[in-house]
Amino acid sequence: MKICLFSSKPYWVKWFGEVNNYYQIEFFTQSLNINTVKETKGAQAVCCFVNDDLNKDVIEKLSENGVKVILMRCAGFNKVDLEAANKCGISVLRVPTYSPNAVSEYALSLMLTLNRKTHKAYHRVKEGNFEINGLEGFNMSNRVFGIIGTGNIGYQLIRVLRLGFNAKVLAYDIFENKDCIDIGVEYVKTLDEIWAQSDIISLHTPLTPKTKYMVCEETLSKMKDGVMIINVSRGALVNTKDAINGLKTGKIGYLGMDVYEHEEDYFFQDHSDQIIKDDDLQLLVSFPNVIISSHQAWYTKEAISSICKTTVQNLFDYEKGEVKKSNLVNNPQ
Ligand code: NAD
């Protein structure tokens, strides 16, 4: 079976090389979209990443070209039109958990960096400036954390905050996780309680119509002044324009984003010799209390190795008709 792998990078070639001796993988550096879908003729599977565009038109073309399986090498599948995939009889498989620790540890690193300003200290000392004025932080253990989404990643973050920092952690999820309760998390019934009581808010839900823009003008108005917001999940959980206004008024005191609403045009690519035309992105980058990284929270050795192994296994299972329920995200007809 031939697989077309899109949004390829040297690290994907290397890690798939280590785990796959069986399938023929053709690597494309371009993302999958309506212009590149023609490359899939003769392939039975495509392997995609977070920003590949799997809209209805692309999926119909995939089907015309004979593609039967979409292998997402990530957990989220918000870019896939599942209804179109169902109609075309295409199975959509993903890697639901590859390393929750990778992502939760990254969220924590954003919190610590924003708080203790190590990114600024690094540059100061490099330039011979040993002044600490302006680098004041706060003790994490004294603050209230609000964690939204207590699945694999949210739980791992909560473990560190509770067992490592002994911090007060409030949580909100549509399903309560007993493991979180066992380590002293207090579930609240409404998001308003999270907004009102939390000093640091970290988002760990998937992007769905219900979670889109959960941080927006209205919800920001309910938060504490100077709140820290961390988003390592999906960009559109935060309304970018409202966040910019929140930063300008001081409502948001710190913003850590590993994901961005319009990241498709920039993330995972080197634009260092070009003019960045996304004004919101440029403005955010210019703020001293904002850290943006380009969707790298997942990127550890353990995680990428696990993603590649599970992706290959997903295709084996598909061929045997033994797909894992947790890895199949649609109902192909
Ligand atoms: P998970 O499915 O284990 O947990 C998600 C949790 O969100 C679940 O407990 C679910 O009940 C909850 N949830 C769903 N809808 C909700 C709603 N409307 N309100 C409140 N809670 C809701 O997923 P996970 O493995 O913890 O991953 C979470 C997200 O992190 C993924 O969907 C993905 O978007 C993102 N992610 C980002 C990276 C990165 O590199 N930045 C890597 C992996 C995952």
Image (cartoon, grey):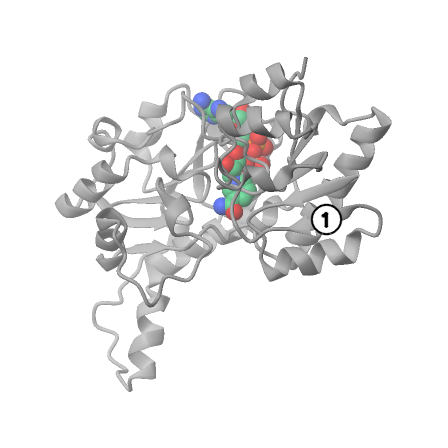
Report the residue at 53% width, 52% height from top: 105
Camera sees residue 72: no
Report the residue at 63% width, 20% height from top: 330
234 vs 146, nearest the viewer: 234
- Residue type indicated by callout 1: Ile
Q: Categorize mark 1 by other alpha carbons within 10 Å: few (<14), some (14-19), many (20+).
A: many
Q: Within the image, what quadrant is residue 322 found in? A: top right
Q: Is residue 99 above or below residue 215?
A: below
178 vs 207, nearest the viewer: 207
Camera sees residue 103: yes
Report the residue at 40% width, 53% height from top: 111
Report the residue at 76% width, 27% height from top: 324
Instruction: List x then y, in percent, for residue 181.
Output: 56, 29
Q: Circle 1 sits on which residue?
A: 25
Q: Is residue 256 above or below residue 80?
A: below
**Residue at far left of view:** 249
Q: Within the image, what quadrant is residue 252 found in? A: top left
Q: Quadrant of the N terminus?
A: top right
Q: Is residue 324 left or right of residue 180?
A: right
Instruction: List x then y, in percent, for residue 128.
Output: 29, 87
